[in-house]
Image (cartoon, rainbow, N blue to C red):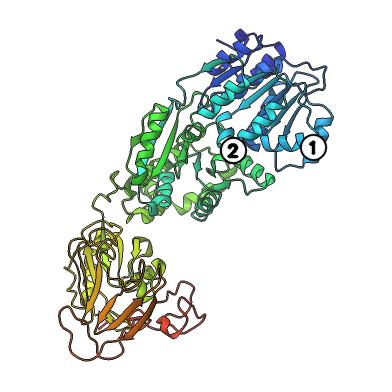
């Protein structure tokens, strides 16, 4: 079937033919035939990119009375980009219709200019709900002559919180109007709008409700949260001809990802709600002209992106609502072409993939993030293809050839090809030759590629996640990005790193490294983090003679009465769950119990309500900023030191300040320009 077979008016047929329209899409074929000569309400369900604008725009234009200056058609769209796109398309369709005026009203543009255009008369108004409400409040918008209201991307308008605005707008239109609702999905709120404002609507559906397009391949990669950006870069390098959209959840994340891509040499930019209209227009102009290779966008900002030949849609994060994935993936595979939709997920998000599969009716393919070898191979043959297809400007280059031939005369053809290819290939090879495997298992495991460690330093030493990472980097020479999943407790911490660093870390136990006079000890943790303290550890890296923690019957955090005998030993009796064991209290409520330490630093709380008891420290002063022990020798289960043995907080040098125990300056402080002091010693 052709557009001529649909019976379009000659003026519209001439315009769409010049625009390159040949055969109508399924949604256009069904909708135009129903709406062109009939007056009825309609609910049309079709995916993004299937030509919905022409599906409602062409029959709408054929119904207008061009001799009247009143607004006869109102089209509502969720974003200004989509509003502008619809307005532009209608103007193109009506190229040979004299006397037609289309006005777009949306936020971010001067409202007085829009009011002036409306007063001059517009048969068609394309609006965003927020700006239209403003115009109605100013008495600048007359909806009393509207014959047709089109709700485009109705599901997205409701997702964005325009429910009350739609009720107000539709309530200001004549009851005799026709309502045409177009949507990619059919959630309950859309059904509510249809039942409330439509009378026996005709339902047209291309494919099943909420179904994704069949010409799009859906792939997901499972990675660690810290490797999400590295996976994005790997994907971009694996597809050298990528012309895609990267979706993020927040405006801040969108800008951050775009800035990082630009810094790393990619042709990328961001579009989100914090940009001015002029900035958004400039970004979209660059993307449409393919000056940009990747556009990083939020869901809202991307609603108006109507760009053909998008090869990839990358979900940097999955959307909050599973239905929104359909909108995102619809940016590629438009006009019958194929496309690829990629999701970068963590193991915890794999269940969301299952939800999306159920809603869309399509399935995902789990794939491995390409390794460095695969990326280099892809880039190599892409370069070969480019060389084969490059356009040679004979006249312009002719004058340079003699000197070029002279310079390269000692090279054979094979050597010349090898060197020429290596100029570009070496760049990727040098970057990826030691690249890590980014893939993780769906069960949350690391495919056996990482190891969890225990280290006997924690909050009492002044550490937080950032400062302990700095400390570990300095003593181990491991890159900061290789230390992750850090969990800092009071007197110890856990962290993860790749398996190849296990032996070097355990070897540090024999290096005699000390912090504030205490030896640093690393141990491999055999269990995953449980949220408590009862984690199993192997003691292959060195014995803990400085005081054990034993757990009888439970092992959760604060799982019973905590007593310290002789200096270092901590034991938990009874209990099982977190804070569920025996705790002796004297005279008060929760956490007011007596905590006794014999011989080292006694810490007692008496009376009062929750956390209200006075804490006094007798003797050694444990947890009062200083730990002291007196006399004797160090034996199993007992920690005794000769000398200061003060436990002073560690302060990071992230701000470029002085590195020294915080006992010499305020906790967390950073003295600019101060002389760097050693935090530890190696024997």
| Residue 132 in view, yes or no | yes
Asked if 591 appears above or below 296 in the picture, the reply is below
* Residue 75 locus on image (x, y percent): 67, 27
Left or right placement of residue 579 versus residue 103 in this view: left
For residue 351, which numbered disc appears in the image?
Answer: none
The residue depicted at 64 percent of the width and 8 percent of the height is 7
Left or right placement of residue 681 versus residue 253 in this view: left
Is label 2 in contact with label 1 (beta carbons under 8 Å)?
Answer: no
Asked if 600 appears above or below 395 in the picture, the reply is below
Q: Nearer the viewer, residue 237 or 574?
A: 574
* Residue 598 locus on image (x, y percent): 24, 82
Q: Secondary structure at mark 2?
A: loop
| Residue 394 in view, yes or no | no
Q: Residues within 10 Å of mark 2 (few under 14, many from 20)?
A: few
Left or right placement of residue 342 versus residue 597 in this view: right
The residue depicted at 35 percent of the width and 75 percent of the height is 460
Location of residue 280 by image quarter: top right
Image quarter where the N terminus lies is top right
In the current view of this chain or complex, which residue is farthest to the front?
Answer: 587
* Residue 328 locus on image (x, y percent): 50, 35
Mark 1, residue position? 138
Q: Nearer the viewer, residue 667 or 329?
A: 667
Mark 2, residue position? 161
Image quarter where the C terminus lies is bottom left
Q: Secondary structure at mark 1?
A: loop
Q: Of the residues under marks 2 and 1, which one precedes in the sequence?
A: 1
């Amino acid at each position: 079937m052709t557009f001529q077979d649909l019976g379009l008016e000659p003026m519209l047929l001439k315009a769409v033919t010049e625009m390159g329209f040949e055969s109508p899409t399924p949604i256009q074929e069904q909708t135009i035939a129903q709406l062109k000569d009939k007056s009825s309400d309609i609910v049309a369900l079709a995916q993004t990119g299937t030509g919905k604008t022409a599906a409602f725009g062409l029959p709408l234009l054929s119904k207008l009375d061009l001799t009247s200056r009143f607004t006869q058609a109102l089209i509502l769209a969720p974003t200004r980009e989509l509003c502008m796109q619809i307005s532009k398309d209608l103007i193109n369709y009506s190229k040979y219709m004299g006397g037609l005026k289309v006005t777009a009203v949306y936020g971010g543009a001067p409202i007085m200019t829009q009011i002036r255009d409306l007063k001059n008369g517009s048969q068609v108004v394309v609006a965003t709900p927020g700006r239209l409400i403003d115009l109605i409040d100013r008495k600048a918008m007359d909806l009393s002559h509207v014959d047709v209201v089109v709700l485009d991307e109705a599901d997205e308008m409701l997702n964005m919180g325009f429910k009350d605005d739609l009720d107000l707008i539709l309530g200001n239109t004549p009851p005799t109007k026709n309502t045409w609702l177009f949507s990619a999905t059919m959630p309950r709120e859309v059904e509510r709008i249809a039942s409330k404002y439509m009378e026996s609507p005709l339902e047209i559906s291309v494919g099943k409700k909420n179904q994704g397009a069949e010409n799009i391949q859906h792939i997901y990669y499972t990675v660690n949260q810290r490797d999400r950006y590295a996976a994005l870069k790997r994907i971009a390098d694996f597809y050298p001809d990528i012309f895609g959209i990267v979706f993020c959840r927040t405006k801040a994340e969108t800008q951050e990802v775009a800035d990082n891509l630009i810094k790393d040499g990619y042709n990328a930019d961001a579009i989100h709600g914090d940009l001015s209209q002029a900035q958004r227009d400039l970004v979209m102009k660059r993307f449409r002209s393919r000056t940009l290779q990747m556009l990083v966008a939020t869901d809202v900002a991307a609603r108006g992106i109507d760009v053909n030949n998008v090869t990839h849609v990358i979900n940097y994060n999955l959307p909050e609502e599973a239905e929104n994935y359909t909108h995102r993936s619809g940016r590629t595979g438009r006009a019958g072409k194929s496309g690829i939709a990629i999701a970068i997920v963590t193991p915890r998000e794999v269940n969301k993939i299952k939800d999306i599969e159920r809603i869309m009716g399509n399935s995902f393919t789990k794939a491995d993030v390409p390794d460095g070898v695969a990326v280099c191979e892809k880039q190599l043959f892409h370069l070969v293809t480019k060389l084969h297809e490059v356009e040679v400007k004979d006249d312009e280059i002719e004058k340079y050839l003699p000197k070029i031939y002279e310079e390269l005369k000692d090279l054979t053809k094979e050597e010349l090809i090898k060197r020429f290819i290596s100029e570009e290939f070496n760049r990727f090879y040098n970057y990826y030759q030691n690249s890590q495997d980014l893939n993780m298992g769906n069960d949350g495991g690391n495919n056996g590629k990482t190891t969890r460690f225990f280290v006997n330093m924690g909050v009492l030493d002044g550490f937080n996640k950032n400062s302990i990472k700095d400390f570990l980097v300095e003593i181990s020479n491991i890159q900061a990005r290789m230390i992750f999943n850090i969990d800092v407790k009071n007197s110890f911490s856990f962290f993860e790193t790749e398996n190849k660093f296990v032996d070097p870390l355990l070897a540090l136990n024999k290096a005699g490294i000390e912090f504030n006079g205490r030896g640093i000890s690393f141990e491999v943790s055999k269990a995953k983090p449980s949220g408590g303290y009862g984690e199993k550890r192997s003691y292959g890296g060195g014995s803990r003679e400085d005081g054990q923690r034993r757990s009888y019957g439970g092992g959760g955090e604060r799982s019973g009465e905590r007593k310290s005998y002789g200096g270092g030993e901590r034991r938990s009796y009874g209990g099982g769950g977190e804070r569920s064991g025996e705790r002796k209290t004297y005279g008060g409520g929760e956490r007011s119990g007596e905590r006794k330490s014999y011989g080292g630093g006694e810490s007692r709380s008496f009376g009062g309500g929750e956390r209200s008891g006075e804490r006094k420290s007798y003797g050694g002063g444990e947890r009062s900023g200083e730990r002291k022990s007196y006399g004797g020798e160090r034996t199993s289960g007992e920690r005794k030191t000769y000398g200061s043995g003060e436990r002073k907080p560690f302060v990071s040098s992230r701000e470029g300040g002085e590195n020294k125990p915080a006992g010499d300056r305020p906790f967390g402080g950073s003295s600019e320009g101060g002389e760097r002091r050693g935090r530890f010693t190696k024997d």
